[in-house]
Image: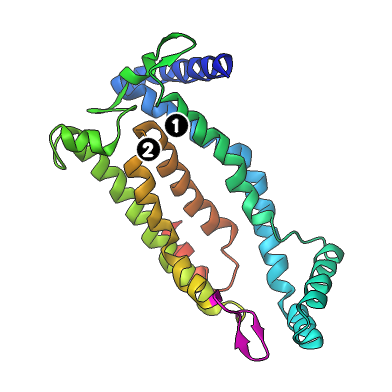
Amino acid sequence: MSTFMSAFASLVEQLADLLQPLFHASAAAAAIVLFTALVRLLVHPLSRAAARGQRARAALQPQIAELRKKHGKDREKFQKALMELHAEEKVSPLSGCLPSLFQMPAFFLLYHLFSSSTIGGEANALLGHKLFAAPLGGRWADALGDGGVFGAQGLVYLALFAVVVAVAAFNYRRTKRMMATSAPVAVADGEQVPGLASVNKLMPFMSFFTLFTVAVVPLAAALYVVTSTTWSAVERAVLYRDMPGAGPATAALV
């Protein structure tokens, strides 16, 4: 693990050296943004597959409704028939999770790298890099203790929070619009599945939880989260532009 972390630290340093003529003291921060973009490019085929899967699942809603009507209260038979339908149509109900799962190692790498004082038995030189006035290994709590909310470090975090809120607001409007125009939620004998209504109410607000992540992780990992979240918003707006309810929100962004 130590050797792997050393190699990853070397990669970040090399990217920072490459970007230094353009970004000067914030070159390491720019390297993290570039690294995030490269990760998202690698994951993009999975995102496209997830979009195709969601379209396919939406197209299956009439057949799923028929299966639910046919099997009534027999959940076991309904679930078996549903799995057979997915297999027959080659639709994976888990495809939408794959892009997020494949990004998690990159996030944890950055988190660990900028949380460690030493790498390979030597001092972690990356902790000396900054985004403007804020150290990449620091957290929002550190910024609050050094100048407060509107101090030099605090302003860096306020800028990141503003980006997160803007992206979350866009995702909120888009999710609400798509949920309002999507197929009716699963029902059983005319009653909504227990707990599903609460989940649907909470879903549009999920993007705002990113604020908490950005506030508690090292700034380098926060940069990854903000860049990846922004990428996701643009990517989903493009890939899902022909889904019901996506049109107006997409036009507002791209």
Task: Find the magenta span and give its range.
Answer: 185-196
Secondary structure state at the residue bearing disc 1: helix
Reply above or below: 132 against 216: above
* In the displayed structure image, the side of residue 26 where residue 143 appears, left or right: left
Task: Say whether residue 95 is left or right of residue 37.
Answer: right
Are the residues tagged 1 and 2 within 8 Å (C-beta)?
Answer: yes
Give the side of residue 141 with respect to residue 166, left or right. Answer: left
Q: Residues within 10 Å of mark 2 (few under 14, many from 20)?
A: many
- Where residue 95 appears, x then y in whole percent? 69, 55
Q: Quadrant of residue 69?
A: bottom right
Residue 205 against residue 33 in the figure, above or below = below
Q: Which residue is mark 1?
A: 111
Magenta stretch encompasses residue 47: no
Give the residue type at disc 2.
Val
Please give the name of the residue rendered at 24% of the width and 45% of the height, measured from the top-left corner. 158
**How many discs mark residues in the rendered view?**
2
